[in-house]
Amino acid sequence: MITPFLTRTCKKPLTVLADLAQLRILDGVDVIAEHDRSFDKGQQVEDETHINALWLAKTHARLHRGQDRLNAASDHVPALLQQSIERGHVLKNHRAATQPVTG
């Protein structure tokens, strides 16, 4: 099985090899994706497992972005977050609560 490569190869040079039958993407000598070659104009070939892995990685990254900003704001934040977890609070992105009220 080809492993999802977007999470571990972001901003990394990759090699694309194509012949008349197949297209392959390599990370060094490792084949990280391969698809049957298509000559249809404008066709986008996607592997659902790659798309799902990318979505999951981005979701996890987004959830931690706010906590990283808090940690940078004060040396006391990690202890505060730990206490919140121990008290059963769910630490997730509450975007709507942080948006300014307009109108």
Image (cartoon, rainbow, N blue to C red):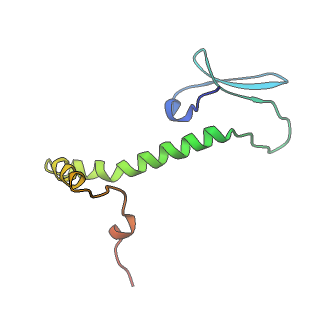
Residue 82's x, y, as percent? 20, 49
Please, which residue is most extreme toward the left here? 76
Q: Residue at x 70, y 40 (%)?
A: 46
Residue at 55% across / 35% down in the picture?
A: 6
- Note whether 102 is above or below 58 in the view shown: below
State which quarter of the image contains the C terminus.
Answer: bottom left
- Residue 13 percent location from the top left of the image: 55, 26
Location of residue 40 (image quadrant) = top right
101 relative position to 77: left or right? right
- Residue 37 location (% of width, % of height): 81, 30
Number of numbered markers? 0
Tell me the quarter of the image containing the N terminus: top right
**Direction top: furthest residue:** 29
34 displayed left or right of 30: right
Which residue does the image show at 16% across and 48% down from the upper left? 79
**Residue 51 x, y percent position in the rendering:** 61, 43
Question: Dividing the picture into quarters, in which one does residue 43 lie?
Answer: top right
57 and 40: which is toward the camera: 57
**Relative to 84, is 97 above or below?**
below
Q: Is residue 56 left or right of residue 1?
A: left
44 on left or right of 58: right
Residue at x-position 55% and y-position 42%: 54
